[in-house]
Image (cartoon, rainbow, N blue to C red):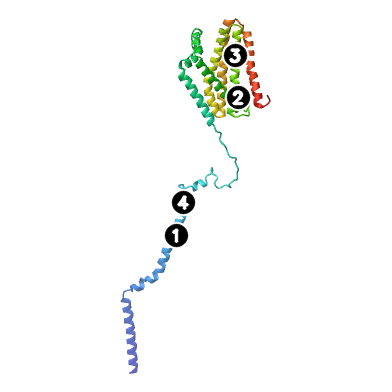
Amino acid sequence: MRSRYLLFIVAFLSASLFIGTSLLAQQKPDSTSIIDTTSMIPSADSTITDSIQRAADSLLILQKKKSIRDTASYKKLMTHPYLPMQTKPSFRINELRIAPNFDGRFYLIIGMLFYLAFIKVTFPKYFSNVFQLIFQSPIRQKQTREQLQQNNLASLFSNILFILNASIFVSLIAIKNGWVDLTLYSCIAYSVVGFTTLYLFKFLFLWLSGWLFSQREAIGNYSFIVFLTNKVMGVFLIPAILLLAFSPLTVQDFAYNSALIIISFLFVYRYLISFSIVRASLKVSAFHFFLYLCTCEVLPMLVLYKLTMDFISGTF
C-alpha cells in the first residue's frame, strides 16, 4: 500500500515538473529582460563622449592649421623673409637731421622774377628790341641801337637786373664749391658791390677815353655793345639760378656748365661785334684790340677778384 502512495507521489511530481517546463518554453520572451535600458546607458554615454572628444580634437587641429596659414591678419608678415621681425633688435643713436631752409632763396628769386616782369611790362618795346638786336642785320642794328640809347631809364633798370642776377649766380657757385666761408646773402652783397664797382669803373674809363681821344661815338657804340650783352646775360642767368638754388648736385652741375657755355658765347659775340665797330671807326688792328682787352677787360676783373677773395678770407 505504501509503495503505491510513493509511486503516485513520484509520478505526480514528475508530471508537474514536465508541465512547468513546457509552459515556460511556450511563453514569449520578456522585453524587460532583453531590452535593458539600464544596462545600455553606460555604453551609449561612452560612445557619445568619445565622438565629442574626437570632434573637439579635430576642431583644435583645424584651428592650429588656420593660425599657421592665416593671410587675413599681420601674422603672415611676422615671418616674411624681407621683414626681420624675429631678429634681435639693435640699439642705434642717430644725429638729428636738420633740413636746409631755402625759404630765403625762394623769396629772393621770386623778387627777381617780379623785377624782370616789371621791366617787361613797363618797357615792352625796349625789352623786345634788346633781343632782336642780336639777330638783326648791321643796317637795322644801327636804327635799333639809336632807339635803345634814347631810353636811359630802361637801360638803367636792365643793368641793375644784370648785376643782381650775376651776383646771385656767382654767390651760389661760391657757396656750392665752398670757396668762401660766408652766408649766401653776405656773399650776394659783396658780389653786388664788386660788380657795381667794376662796371662803374669801366664806364668812367671808357667815357674818359672817348673824351680824351675825341672818339665819343666809337666809344659810345662799344659801351652800348658791352652793356647790351650784359642785359641779355642777366635774363639768361635766371633759369640757371633756379636750377642752382633748388636742384640736386647732378642738375646743378648741368646748369653750371650750360650757363658757362651761354656766357662764353655772349662774350665772344661781344668782342667780335665790338672789334668790327671799333675797327671801322678807329682803324685799329686785331693785335691792338687784343691788348686793349687784356689791359682794360681781363686785368681789372682779375685784380678785383683777387682783392675780393683776400678781403673775404681776411688776408687783405
Q: How far apart in space, not on screen, are marks 2 and 3 (Cα)? A: 21 Å
In the picture, the disc for residue 54 is 1
Q: What element carries label 4?
A: helix
Image location of residue 205, percent across then percent down: 61, 13
Image location of residue 278, percent across then percent down: 58, 8
State if disc 2 and disc 1 touch (CB < 8 Å).
Answer: no
**Does residue 282 sit above or below 181 in this rendering?**
above
In the picture, the disc for residue 204 is 3
Closer to the observer: label 1 or label 4? 4
Q: Is mark 1 on a helix, strand or loop?
A: helix
**Which kind of residue does numbered mark 3 sit on?**
Leu
Instruction: Give whichever of discs 4 and 3 has the lower sequence position.
Output: 4
Q: Is residue 258 visible?
A: no
Graded by Cα atoms within 10 Å as few (under 14), some (14 to 19) or many (20 or more), the crowding at tag 4 reads few
Q: Is mark 3 on a helix, strand or loop?
A: helix
Graded by Cα atoms within 10 Å as few (under 14), some (14 to 19) or many (20 or more), the crowding at tag 3 reads few
In the picture, the disc for residue 66 is 4
Q: How far apart in space, not on screen, are marks 4 and 3 (Cα)? A: 91 Å
Instruction: Give whichever of discs 2 and 3 has the lower sequence position.
Output: 2
Q: How far apart in space, not on screen, are marks 1 and 3 (Cα)? A: 110 Å
**Does residue 161 sit above or below 148 in this rendering?**
below
In the picture, the disc for residue 37 is none
Residue 195 sits in which quadrant? top right
Closer to the observer: label 1 or label 3? 3
**Which kind of residue does numbered mark 1 sit on?**
Arg
**Which kind of residue does numbered mark 4 sit on?**
Lys
Q: How far apart in space, not on screen, are marks 1 and 4 (Cα)? A: 18 Å
Closer to the observer: label 2 or label 3? 3
Closer to the observer: label 4 or label 3? 3
